[in-house]
């Protein structure tokens, strides 16, 4: 009986240790909060902050004391994020609802915030498409290109100049693990992320001498609003909480981060394949994820 109790106590202890460990991985350490605020504070611009990865990064930055400017299209969702953050942290949150896929709107955002003392920008606004590219709406593909690439170029170009002048700052780009090879059934989305990955890698080296950190965050599948907009089923996926802290911990320490255990597993398991081999594997993976393609395959079969 005593042995049984001892075993149960050990199991409980192990379980609670594991839960605590999991929780601590999802929280910024006090040292990290200090480092981030000192190097990139006092204010951060986060695009795509109303949902998923952007929202998680905004919350974590607020926990480190950053004032925030948060952007997305839907004002009510942004106001809900603002209320949630301000119920927990004593920071200022400015809400700027603007559609960054519309030509000229990114400049409007820049003009509205140019007087702010921003040290960090997180460029998380973005979405994906899936299915056969030849059958997709060209209008939607061009809209995605404008948001995922053009607006990111405009913002990163502006803040590269600002941060170089002030000799400090950080830019976080949202790349993806699909950025490293062609991806059938998400061909154009993967191409937008290849653009982001390449832009971030190049800018990282260019801005290093000016004490400006550039990070490409390349997650694998994450449960967020992304799946439904891209019409993809995210099978095994991480939560935004599992990728937020690893991304912020990597800022200023590396050029690219593959945040979360699942991302690392997927990236490292593909690493030894030649590029054409990776494309073949991604075709298999994506045909399971892209709903449109899967339904068509089922119909043909
Ligand atoms: N989820 C994944 O599996 C995954 C993996 C790798 C990389 N990523 C990348 O991570 C980034 C964030 O994605 P997520 O997973 O967090 O998706 P999400 O939950 O759908 O969040 C996207 C955010 O972008 C905003 N947004 C969308 N269209 C916009 C527009 N035209 N103008 C301004 N804001 C806009 C959305 O708010 P509104 O709808 O209100 O505008 C939302 O706040 C994206 O760049 C995505 O490509 C995602």
Image: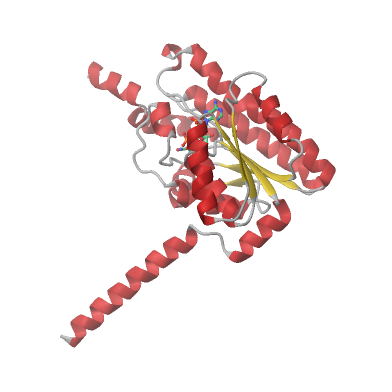
Q: Is any atom of residue 258 visible in this view?
A: no
x%, y% of residue 164? 81, 42
Tell me the residue at 66%/56% (across/down): 36
Q: Is any atom of residue 247 visible in this view?
A: yes
Q: Considering depth in this image, is 54 or 222 the residue closer to the camera?
A: 54
From this viewpoint, which residue is outermost toward the bottom? 2
The part of the image, by quadrant, that contains residue 31 is bottom right
Q: Quadrant of the C terminus?
A: top left
x%, y% of residue 294? 30, 24
Q: With 104 as the anchor, is 248 left or right in this view?
A: left
From this viewpoint, which residue is outermost toward the right? 165
x%, y% of residue 260? 48, 51
The part of the image, by quadrant, that contains residue 125 is top right
Tell me the residue at 19%/87% (across/down): 2
x%, y% of residue 151? 64, 27
Q: Considering depth in this image, is 66 or 15 the residue closer to the camera?
A: 66
Q: Quadrant of the N terminus?
A: bottom left
Question: In the displayed structure, would residue 120 be above or below residue 296?
Answer: below
Tell me the residue at 72%/38% (across/down): 203
């Amino acid at each position: 009986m005593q042995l049984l109790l001892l075993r149960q106590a050990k199991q409980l202890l192990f379980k609670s240790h594991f839960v605590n460990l999991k929780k601590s991985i999802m929280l910024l350490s006090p040292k990290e909060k200090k480092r981030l605020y000192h190097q990139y504070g006092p204010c951060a611009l986060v695009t795509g902050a109303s949902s998923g990865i952007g929202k998680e990064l905004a919350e974590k930055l607020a926990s480190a004391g950053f004032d925030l400017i948060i952007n997305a299209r839907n004002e009510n969702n942004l106001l809900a994020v603002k209320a949630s953050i301000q119920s927990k942290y004593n920071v200022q949150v400015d809400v700027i609802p603007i559609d960054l896929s519309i030509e000229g709107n990114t400049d409007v955002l820049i003009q509205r915030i140019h007087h702010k003392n921003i040290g960090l920008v997180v460029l998380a606004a973005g979405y994906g498409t899936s299915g056969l590219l030849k059958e997709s709406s060209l209008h939607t593909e061009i809209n995605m290109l404008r948001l995922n690439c053009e607006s990111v170029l405009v913002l990163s170009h502006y803040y590269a100049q600002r941060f170089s002048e002030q000799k400090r700052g950080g830019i976080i780009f949202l790349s993806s693990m699909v950025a490293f090879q062609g991806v059938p059934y998400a061909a154009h989305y993967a191409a937008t992320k290849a653009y982001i990955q390449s832009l971030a890698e190049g800018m990282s080296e260019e801005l290093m001498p000016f004490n400006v950190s550039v990070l490409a965050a390349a997650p694998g599948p994450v449960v967020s609003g992304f799946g439904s907009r891209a019409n993809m089923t995210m099978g095994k996926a991480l939560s935004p909480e599992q990728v937020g802290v690893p991304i912020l911990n990597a800022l200023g320490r590396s050029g690219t981060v593959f945040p979360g255990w699942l991302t690392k597993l997927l990236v490292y398991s593909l690493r030894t394949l030649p590029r054409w081999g990776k494309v073949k594997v991604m075709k298999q993976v994506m045909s399971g994820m892209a709903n449109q393609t899967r339904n068509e395959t089922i119909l043909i079969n």
